[in-house]
Image (tube, rainbow, N blue to C red):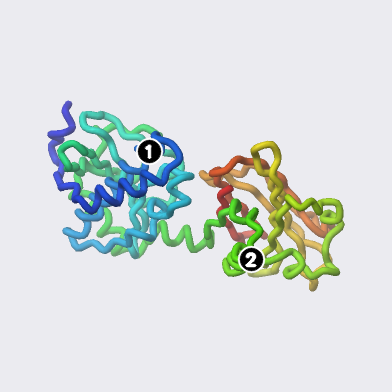
């Protein structure tokens, strides 16, 4: 089957403004492969936005990860925020393809997946159809429902007040923290860290309250930041320590009780998660610890999440090295 003539495809032009935006995003990428990926993702998002605007469906272009410079480098995402509904993933394919790649990092926090055939030579694109969910990294185009069905799907979600993606992000309380900026030693960099909620360990824990774990790690190349984390039952301090080691970054993560409490509460959990929210490593307090610690290593551009949980209450923060 030639999908350039797909039976319910909708053809839309790729505007000059869309091409310029896609090219600008592509030029900021570290490799030709990544540049190609970002250019196609950007065009797919912009064409989908044009269609939804024509159908009078509100969109928020800049709210998605696809419009975040750091996330574009770290992830293969082409999401478009629909206020009051959630994030729609806009996956691009080349002409005549019969399958569409759906990266695992897009399997959650999405209200649907629309496939966009991008023909840069013809300066046009076709909306081939959509599916509400996926279970595999390869989607056969024979599974697609029509773009009109997408409109019905979004209308149903809006009427039901689901807002799936928004609810997940609110619960996670995630803001991406770029750890590479912490190695900067300028005053401006320090002010930036504090402005985004990160302070020195002494400011959060107090000089007299520093744990012995810090006494032997005072090399100039080590960078530490701390942040107060408020759960419903207790407030704790999250401490992040960075140290460059042979082309990688060694990361120590600690959770400390604040000065008002001698130990961490029973069952408090500190965990490191990958981009699909799978736990990589974790530690749980038994009521006797005055801190929990985990250690990981990674290279520039790698992303991960840190989760602090007590019973049903949890806070998750996203980081990129």
Instruction: State the SS at label 2.
Output: helix
Q: Identify the disc placed on residue 81.
A: none
Tell me where residue 204 sits by quadrant.
bottom right
Tell me which label, 2 or 1, sits earlier in the chain. Answer: 1
Task: Tell me the residue that label 1 is attached to.
Answer: 102
Q: Are marks 2 and 1 in contact (CB under 8 Å)?
A: no
Task: Tell me the residue that label 2 is attached to.
Answer: 187
Residue 79: where, in percent of width, then height?
A: 36, 51
Instruction: State the SS at label 1.
Output: loop
How far apart are the alpha carbons under marks 2 and 1? 42 Å
Looking at the picture, tell me which residue is in the foreground, 19 or 292.
19
Tell me where residue 131 sits by quadrant.
top left
Residue 66 falls left or right of residue 251: left
Quadrant where the N terminus lies?
A: top left
Outermost residue to the top: 1
| Observer able to see residue 269 | no
Residue 198: where, in percent of width, then height?
A: 64, 65
Residue pictured at 65% horizontal, 39% vertical: 248
Residue 263: where, in percent of width, then height?
A: 81, 63
Residue pictured at 60% horizontal, 40% vertical: 299
Looking at the picture, tell me which residue is in the foreground, 121 or 140.
121
Residue 277: where, in percent of width, then height?
A: 54, 46
């Amino acid at each position: 089957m030639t999908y350039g003539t797909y039976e319910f495809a909708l053809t839309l032009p790729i505007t000059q403004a869309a091409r310029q935006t896609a090219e600008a995003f592509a030029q900021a990428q570290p490799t030709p492969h990544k540049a190609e990926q970002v250019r196609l993702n950007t065009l797919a998002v912009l064409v989908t936005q044009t269609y939804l605007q024509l159908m009078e469906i509100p969109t928020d272009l800049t709210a998605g990860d696809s419009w975040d410079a750091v996330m574009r480098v770290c992830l293969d995402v082409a999401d478009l925020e629909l206020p009051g509904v959630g994030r729609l993933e806009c996956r691009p394919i080349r002409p005549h393809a019969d399958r569409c790649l759906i990266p695992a990092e897009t399997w959650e926090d999405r209200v649907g997946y629309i496939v966009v055939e991008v023909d840069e030579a013809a300066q046009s694109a076709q909306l081939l159809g959509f599916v509400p969910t996926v279970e595999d990294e390869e989607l056969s185009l024979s599974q697609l429902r029509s773009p009109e069905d997408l409109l019905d799907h979004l209308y149903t979600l809006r009427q039901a007040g689901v807002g799936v993606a928004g609810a997940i992000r609110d619960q996670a309380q995630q803001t991406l923290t770029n750890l590479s900026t912490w190695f900067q030693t300028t005053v401006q960099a320090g002010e930036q860290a504090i402005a985004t909620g990160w302070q020195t360990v002494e400011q959060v824990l107090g000089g007299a309250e520093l744990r012995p774990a810090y006494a032997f790690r005072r090399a100039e190349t080590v960078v530490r930041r701390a942040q107060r984390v408020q759960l419903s039952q207790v407030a704790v301090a999250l401490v992040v320590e960075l140290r460059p080691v042979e082309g990688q970054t060694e990361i120590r993560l600690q959770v400390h009780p604040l000065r008002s409490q001698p130990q961490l509460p029973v069952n408090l959990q500190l965990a490191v998660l990958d981009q699909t929210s799978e736990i990589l490593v974790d530690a749980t307090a038994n009521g006797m610890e005055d801190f929990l610690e985990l250690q990981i290593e990674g290279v520039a551009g790698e992303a991960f999440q840190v989760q602090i949980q007590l019973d049903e209450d949890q806070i998750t923060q996203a980081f990129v090295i």
